[in-house]
Amino acid sequence: MLENLERIKQQFSDELSAVKSRDELEKIRVAFLGKKGLVTEELKNLRNLNAEEKKVAGMQVNMLKNEIEQAIVDYQKTLEEMEYQKQIESAERYDYSIPSEVEVGTLHPITIVQKKIEDIFKTMGFIIEDGLEIQTEYNNFEAVNIPKNHPARDMTDTYYLENGQLLKTHTSASQNTIMKKYGAPKPGEPLKVLFPGRCFRNENIDASHENTFFQLEGMMIGEDISISNLIYFMKALLTEVFQREVKVRLRPGFFPFVEPGFELDINCAICGGEGCPTCKHSGWVELLPCGMIHPNVLSMGGIDPDKYTGFAFGLGLTRLAMMKYNIKDIRLFNSGNLKQLRQFTK
Amino acid sequence: MLISMNWISEFTDLSGVDIKELINQFTLSTAEVEDIYEMGKNIKDVVVGKLVEINDHPNSKKLHLVKVDIGSEVVECVCGAPNVFVGAVVPFAKLGGQVGELVIKEVQIAGATSRGMCCSEKELGISDNHEGLMILDDIYPLGTDIKEFMQLEDTVFEVDNKSLTNRPDLWGHYGIAREIATLTKRPLKPLELMDTDIYRELAPIDLKVENTDKIYRYSCITIDNITKKKSPINMRIRLTYCGMRPINLLADLTNYLMMEMGQPMHAFDNGKVSKIRVKTMPEQTNFLTLDGVERKIDTDTLMICDEKEPVAIAGIMGGELSEITDNTDSVLLESANFDAVSVRKSATRLGMRTDASARYEKTIDPELTVPAIKRFLKLLAEIDPGVKVTSALTDCYVKHYETITIQFDKAYVDKYTGIDISSNFIEETLTALGFGLNRKGDEFEVVVPSWRATKDVTMKADMIEEITRIYGYDNFEIKSTKSLLTPIRHSEDRDNELKMKLFLSERYAMNEVHSYLWYESKLNKEIGIVTEPNIRVINSLTAENDTIRSTIIPSLLGFVYKNVDTTPEMGMFEIGRVSDGLKEDGLCNERKRLGIVVASKKLSEKEVYFKVKEIVEQLLLAIKNVRPVFAIKEELSKYNYVHPVNSAKISLKGEEIGYFSVLNPKVKNKIDKKLNVAYAEIDVELLETVTAETLRYVEPSKYPGVTIDLSLLTEKELRFEKIAEYIGEYKCEYLKSFHLVDIFEDEKLLPGKKSVTIRFEFVSMERTLEGQEISAMTDELLAILKAKGIELR
């Protein structure tokens, strides 16, 4: 019997070395370890032996069985590795340099810039509002302290409609409506609103003039809103908008709806304030008008100016978009020209 | 406006002050300075010289060889001026000296040696007179540097006029000087005036103001025995530096007063004007202004008239016939205050804006008229001591501004500024600016000076500006606000607007566009779009685009047309405003509309139709989690670009919010026959009236479901929604869902019919359904459908 085992072992080793695939390996497994396999037969043969022989031979047979089982498992791993190598060698080499070409949609550049600014203001607790484009004279002029006979009303660049309404000339036209909507703020909870909008000026169009453009205006009203707060907010917000540490300076500026009113300059981005042709060697660039909301404007908005103060500021959104994307011709915005507009993927 | 620092220095002592820094301070505290000019620095070594000998130039007819005595020596030079004469005293630029860009060297001019230069006024930069040499009075020692008696060196700065619109007091040097005195904390000297009380007994001028609504005050006086014709040199230099052309003494003096006090004045030739009537003309009148132009004067324009005829347009310009000439020795001097709105409107109607009208438009102080006359007399008498006042100072003060008193306290200032500005600073600042001040501790009662009280300063908040601008915004401590930490609820409408834009651009690769609020009628005509009449703009510069749009679709179709040649495959959208007619109150019914358009040459018309339908459906599901319902709406075909058959209204929970359509062939053929276009318009505000459905999670069955595909044979015209309705009649708890798989049409195989394949899914929450149960349910379903005329294919 022991010779038998020796022969089986030799036979297994010979056959295994010829195996090329898992199927062949399985066949060998069945041939040696299957129900009628050679080793299994030997195990069955054990019952013909006496106890002493059985003990010796049994150990031998089981050793052989284990050896073969282990060899098969090992050989299986080798086969897997071989197959894997073959798979990799035969794999197609993909060209990562082939560009992906997916049609991408775009937002309007104004929407992109507006969203960015709205997001900044939202982080500081501002509500976003928008108003009508077709406004009453009251909202556009009276309510922001531009009474009849004021020179600003003479300007022929207001579009008037047949019914006496007009196309709003500035986002300030929404101030009154917003104040009335929210009413006087609760103590410690100042009203903080940002209201972008489309404005209109009745003028001829060229590369730097549009009759339809976007502005953005913000205001904050509360019991103790001060000039100091105005400077703080402007500096903080503009630092976010321009993504750099912005220096601001205020100069007196006259706008009927604020008192005091300011022109806000920021330090020139080109020269950093040293003076260059862009800033006309002053180191400062005029950016936006702002000021403390005029008591008359608060009154007309139903907010008691003796109790509440507030600041307001305006920003030319179209101008900002032109700055951001280096757009030289303002006519792009309302052109509907897809060759141009498809570029604004972010 | 140009401001001379020499002039300013007459009113406040600026010795030791850094002028550049001061001007910068002025920008930050008062008004924007646009430019600074250093005058006269490029005039060097120009001295008084006398021409002692004049000879013809051997090689030139125009040039002369002149000998100039400059005290220390006699210098030879070549001179081309026509007005040379022996004994003429002239400014002479010595060798090594400088005149403008020109450095004086010994040069050969047409073969003769020239060792210096005789100068004209233009060369010295003090007027545009280049007709000949400047002739000086023969009163200075020869060789004296002209800068010793001519104020050539000056710092002139230009203030942005726009930043002065609300400051009538800053339209003259004295007002600017008040600011500068405040900024430098130096005293402001009073203006030297002539006492006119001594003429009280003289007869007044015959003056009547007939239209009192257009005027505040009219003051005048007559002066005789004026002998001097030319203004003193330093006055001329100042006028030139400030942008005024010197003319003659009287004209120059009125301009000088205007530049100094901001009070426009007018001198009439007294020989030609004897009475003053301030009135409008009863009918349109022609009037010759002193610039030689014949003007048509309407009945709203205030005029200054004498007995017979108009002599000046009030506050704008005098007439040619009463103009001062070189022969004038007697004048009637007007110093008046006309209504700002009236002057502005008249100036606009006449299309003439003058230095005077620009000032009146700012609402200047009527208190100025009399001091201006007194100042004029003072200056005139200094120049021409023999002048004689021949009338009483005649003054008609039609309307007074009320005295404005403002009360406030330091606490108010602290609250408004957010910082601590001392009461002493408040007191000093306001006093320096001319405010009358009554202070009790931290409480102030302030009387607004007349020059600020015409419109500029009216209330407490105005005091804040006065205090803070002088305090300096750069000196502010900057502080955040203190506020409670409360959540901010953002409006869902706005969030949805952005969501829709992102959805369309990201999911459907569409491009957002912006279009105008009005119809572009030329373009619409070109592509055959007929729009409904709607409210119009009455004063548009582009008159053909005067109708406000009532729908956004024509704008987008215009863009389709503009892009079809370059980018025929397009998907565009816009959220924009329209005015859908008028509301009951007569105001525009402004609506926010979403327009979507898909155009393609690759896709068939049917495909773009379904593309737009899909976009609408998916968009509404994304925003509201509600599936829209579509239905035919015949009224849509009132728009000639809507397809009469292939269009449908869009409803959400029963609310009609818009429609979609393929382009009507009438318009399609004009844009491009091969371009297939479909579009949709949704009223965003109506959409926002529909509440969104919250998403509800349903636990999937633990048991496998069974899907059955059934091909149903139906009439060709039967809409899917009908089939779905019939299926819905089968109430079966196990029929979980059904989906359209395919529609097959073939005229030969299935004439008049179509085969609709629908996948039904049956599932139970409690158990695995048996095969025979499924077939029983399928039979029941088919029986219902059969009753509706739908059979299994």
Image: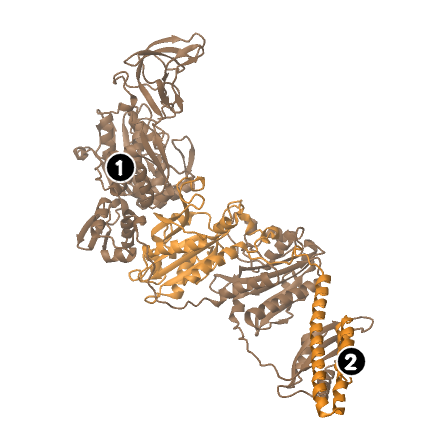
Chain colours: A orange, B brown
Give the secondary structure at mark 2.
helix
Is there any visible trace of residue B792 in the rendered image?
Answer: no
Question: Residue at left 35%, top 51%?
Answer: A261
Q: Residue furthest front?
A: A52
Q: Can you tell which mark lies on residue A31?
A: 2
**Residue behind mark 1:** B17
Indicate the position of residue B116 as horizontal and vertical percent values. Answer: 36, 16
Which one is in front, A241 or B558?
A241
Rendered view: B340 above or below B505: above
Indicate the position of residue B390 as horizontal and vertical percent values. Answer: 22, 30
Quadrant for the N terminus of chain B, please.
top left
Horizontally, residue B388 falls left or right of residue A113, namely: left
Rendered view: B282 above or below B84: below
Indicate the position of residue B287 as horizontal and vertical percent values. Answer: 40, 34
User: Which-is-in-front pick, marks 1 and 2?
Assistant: 2
Give the secondary structure at mark 1.
loop
Amino acid of disc 1: Val
Amino acid of disc 2: Ala
- The CA distance from mark 1 to mark 2 is 114 Å
Chain bearing tag 1 is B
Horizontally, residue B405 falls left or right of residue B88, namely: left
Is there any visible trace of residue A303 in the rendered image?
Answer: yes
Q: Residues within 10 Å of mark 1 (few under 14, many from 20)?
A: few
**Quadrant location of residue A63?**
bottom right
**Quadrant location of residue B257?**
top left
Rendered view: B523 above or below B351: below
Quadrant for the C terminus of chain B, please.
bottom right
